[in-house]
Image (spheres, coloured by chain):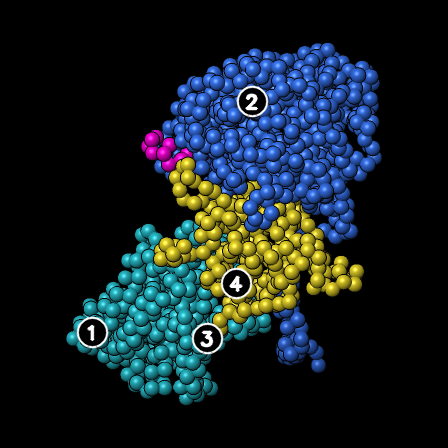
Chain colours: A cyan, B yellow, C blue
Amino acid sequence: MLKGKFLPLDSELLPEGSERCSLSKFILWLLPIGLLLLWGLYAAFKVLANGLGVTGLDDYFGFGLWITFDLAVIALGAGAFFTGLLRYILNIDPLKNIINLAVIVGFICYSGAMLILVLDIGQPLRAWFGYWHANVHSMLTEVIFCITCYCAVLVIEYIPLILEQRQLDRIPLIRHLAHNFHVFMPLFAGIGAFLSTFHQGSLGGMYGVMFGRPYAFREGFFIWPWTFFLFVLSAVGSGPLFTVLIASLMEKITGRKLVSWEVKSIMGKIAGTMLSVYIVFKLLDTWWWMTDTLPSRAGLTFDQMFYGWIYGKWLMFLEIIICGLLPCVILLKKSLRERVRLFYAAALLDCLGIVINRYVMTVQTLAQPVLPFDSWATYVPNWVEWAASILVIAYGAFLLSLSYRYLPIFPQEAALNRDCGSLGLPGRGS
Amino acid sequence: MSAEHKEFRIKWGMVIDLDKCTGCGACMVACQAENNLAPTPDASNKKKVMNWLVVYELTNGKAFPAHEVAYLPRPCQQCGTQPCASVCPVVATEKNEEGGIVSQIYPRCIGCRYCMAACPYHARYFNWLDPVWPEGLDKVISPDVSVRPRGVVEKCSFCHHRFMKAKDKARVEKRDIFELEDGEYVTACAEACPNGAIAFGDLLNPGHKVSALAESPHAFRLLARLGTDPQVYYLSRRDWVRAQGDNRLAEEITRG
Amino acid sequence: MGFDRRAFLKFAGGAGAGIAVSPLPWKLLDDVSIWSQNWSWIPANPRGETTYELTTSKLCPSACGLKVRLTGGMPVRALGNPDHPLGGGLSALAAAEVQLMHSPARVKTPLRRDSGGNFIPIGWEEAEEALAGGLDAAGADIACVSGDETGSGLDVLSAFLGERGSDKLYLMPSEAQSAARAWRLMGGSGQPGYDLESSDFILAVGANVLESWGTFIRNRRIFAAARPHGEEPERGFVYAGPVQNNSAAVADSWIPLKPGSELIFILGLAAILTQRGLSAAAPDFASFREMLAGFDPQKVYALTGVSPQTLQNTAAALLRADRPLVLAGSECNQGGGAAQILAALALNLLLGGRCLRDIPLARPVLPAAEGRQEVQNRDLVAYMAQKPNPQALILYEANPVYALPDPESAAVALRNTPFKVSFSAFMDESSALCDLVLPMPLGLERLDDIESPYGCGKVFYALSRRTLETADTRHGMDILLRLSAGRGGLPASYREVLEARSAALGADHSALEAGEVFEAKAPAPGRLMLLPEILNRAAESKNSVISLALAPVQKIALGTAQTGIPPFNVKTIRGNELSGAEMSIFINSATAYSRGLREGDRVRLAGKHGEIRARVLIFEGIVPDAVGVPMGFGHTALDVFSRNKGANATELFTATPEAGTGFTLWNQIDVSIVKI
């Protein structure tokens, strides 16, 4: 803190060497987030009190917005495990400057997804049956195992960040504890990477194994349908960029530099590489599905997989070409990647493409009529589903705001803002 | 993690003659009353109406006067290779008992609906809300099937409780429970149909008429090429009706 | 040392740790699966011994046999009874019969209308007093409408009215009534009977034999027996009618007919058969043959839409058969008039008439009761057209305000009647307009009888029996008999009437009460007349040009006028038939194109008296220039399962006198369709 400047009321709690807005401004910022949270909690209460009949889900669309949302945030939250893997196992050192954020974003994504899952299953009191009566043949069992375990890993990775809080850090026991956590971090990063790879894959496997649903069904390798690998690749191809986008969004809101361009660029390059691997396989998979799996296994044609505008082929084109190939080109070519606007456009498209992928795999799979005498079904999520999804986003914003304000998560922050700080530029936002 | 094919010594199956079904709906009503499905004042949103058995209307798609219509009752197909049981994370649905009926264990179901997503027949239904029985109507719950709470998936059980009763009877009479007489155990829908459109029995027992009917040249199964191996067969002498049993490519249709 | 804070914390910690390592948490967790299943608001299964009782359905018009399953003495399921002569399986209505006993639409106590126009529940003493007072005040000016046409209740009603000096006993219009009247015009003694069992070829003209016509559950059992699974059918079945209905769906072929042209089609067939040399031993056969000369295939084509080739093929099929049977009727079992049934009976006689029977009408067992034929000969629709205003009106299981053509005028007639009482199990549209509503027990709750329902081939007699004691209902017949207090030789209870009926038929009453059925062979008809003049006059009136003809469609799943849609049957309504409160009417694509309509358009259909609103559904199984309208929707009373669903097709019906026979009919209805 600079002498002579106005200090927030909670200045003693703020990270050393950082500059934060006043407490009242911070509370004002939290207010709309809190309102969204309350709205979402109301929706969650409706679901738990009355049952899932209050949602727009139905017997054709047992999976809808929530599952799409879960799959999307889990894919985008993959930044945590992948960055952890790169930082702690492969020792790509500059990533230490973004790993904390990646962990928090990952934690938000995973805990948020679990929150939604609690609402989404009809008998939340029995949620633990996945362990108790596990069906080891089900991809979903593996998802339940890995997601819950990995969420625990993320908690373990998050704890040292909390322990480094300025006031807590003064207590010797906690300081030592935090240090020991750091020592073991490569171990947890390894466990996390293992768990994540499997559940990202199993999420894809969930769809690929549905041999009664030609839109989703894929052949594969051993017990794993191709979607297993595609989901892993698409997650690591987009997760790191989602972390970068969050970091940049925070910079936009706070008006402070948090992560250096160099780090962002490395993340972009890595994600772009993974994305390009993904897209190659995705194209191969689509081609094989179209020319072999669909006609031979289901007696259906590629054209029969699309219907009208809402389930049109444009979605597939948008997903694979505009949101797949295009960002690949931008992220892999250095001259393009270094142009800030193009870089962010590529990042946004990349993330959008993964969301579309998770959406069509969920909703279009179920909308497509398999019985020859059935017809396409349409699904419109209602306010309850939106509100609960927004609950998770608001919860994420809330957690991120608190973490940013009170925890030292950006190692570069002090250095990057030293100049503007001395010039007396205002530190806006949270 | 692929689905497992399961075979048993007895295999309960249905052979539904679509040339005899008028689509009157008696089977659906009998099914609801037998299995305690709560009534609903407005059933026009068919995607949210609980019906273990649904009668579909099939049309040959031609304009008047060449138009033809047929009705297709769709219970759970009790697949030999189940798209549903293989995906259930908590083993709440299984095909493990003699007879090959795909079970649904309501107290274990967590309501994740993965099985519904996996079933191409839409044979599975979710209790979106708690069932509501108008006052008085709750007195006519049948004694054999428990009423399901909200939040669990349910489906046609081939009136499994009737199988249990038939077995009990055979045990008391010191008969082989795997050699029930034809007609000793039938489902509520088969029993209700005045047109006798639904034949029910052991597909593997030559003494049961369904075993021969399943071999009929007019027999077909829904979406058989997906590899689900259903235990429900349909019969029709009409080509266009049989053609609607499965998805076929243009070149397969011209080949006939 | 006391129990200080530290000790408390120690204790709490120890207890917590102890519980945590005990099996308790795990046991509780595992129990979650049990108690998350058994919430207090989830109904529990009944307990008790399972028993079965055999009976015959009084509620389902098919009079099918029932095996009622009881648990601890409580009926829980209606099952079919294959050993019953009219049984086999269940109709969608009979399948719901047990559940209907607890339908929210039931009248639970006697109700009297107070001065403010609201119903107030009253006790039975007060109800019977009010009934006596209302009827006594009306003197001899009492009319009665009965919805029961097969029971001995008709005798009681007739004797009750007769004893008070009234003969205004009417039946709700039905095919049975038209057929019996046609039969007697021809010289038959009772009602026509059809020996479907022995027939090897059935041509149903307009009669929805597998859904709603006659003893349809028996019809369907016979159909099932003739069609072994997946094999070529042993007996032929052809359906002719305007709509590809449930019967047409499984017929060997569907012959599309313009609505109301059934008579012409039958005469066209008769013309071909007489040309082929077939004759009937009727005194007026010569003039019959002469009359048929006017119905050459070209003319038949113009009036019915049936090509000469199809007509010839159908005639040939009839000729090939050994025991063919032609059944004529109207889709909704009413309003088809007598001429087409007469023509079909004549056609059967040409074909040898081997499957026709003459079933005697129930003879009155009460001295004061008139014969069934007198009752059948009265025409309720014609009576209503006179805008009568009797001083008192008794509705006995009848719902004219819903079911009669032009229901609004029936409602007006009811409103103009000073005292009206409804004996009804359900709070239907007519009961809702009455001054006094007396809850009737349902078929499964009362002892009542069913004698030779229309369509059967033998003399048939069966009793419905009480499987459940329902506290607050009383059989209307017992009430009326008590009211008569023995005057006019009336017995004290309805049971005595039924016992007398059993005795008159030579049946064992106690066996009948135990669920057995009495059957006796009915004789072949004697020498019958063919009545060419009547047929010709009726046929000539069919020349009128109709721009868009109404083709009603009945589905028994939607219940009867009294029951409304049973709760369990709502799910049988297809998604394209009803959406929320809006029902669909259906036309084929050619009709739609010519009128500029598309699927999903909202339209107004207007008849002479009323109009309905609906959505257009394109269904190719209907003749051009005709609009299919489902029956059974548009209830405004009853319960949530019936109310607020579509519109009532009878709003569009216009009754006119049938040329030749003079009976009323409503099967050629011109409607207009306008997009809104």
Provide the residue designation for mark 3.
Answer: A223
What is the chain identity of the residue bearing mark 2? C
| Residue in view at x 55 percent, y 34 percent | C320
Which residue occupies the foreground of this view, C16 or C177? C177
Q: Secondary structure at mark 4?
A: loop
The amino acid on which the numbered mark 2 sits, given as a three-letter code, is Ala
- Of mark 1 and mark 3, the one earlier in the sequence is 3
The N terminus of chain A, quarter of image: bottom left
The answer to whether residue C108 of the structure is visible from this angle is: no
Q: Secondary structure at mark 1?
A: helix
What is the chain identity of the residue bearing mark 3? A
> Which label sits in the foreground, 1 or 3?
3
**Label 3 CA crowd tier, 10 Å (few <14, some 14–19, many 20+):** few
Cβ atoms under marks 3 and 4 closer than 8 Å:
no
Q: Secondary structure at mark 3?
A: loop
The amino acid on which the numbered mark 3 sits, given as a three-letter code, is Ile
Measured along the vertical axis of the image, is residue C632 above or below residue B244? above
Provide the residue designation for mark 4.
Answer: B229
Q: CA gap, disc 3 to disc 2?
A: 71 Å
The answer to whether residue A326 of the structure is visible from this angle is: yes
Provide the residue designation for mark 2.
Answer: C343
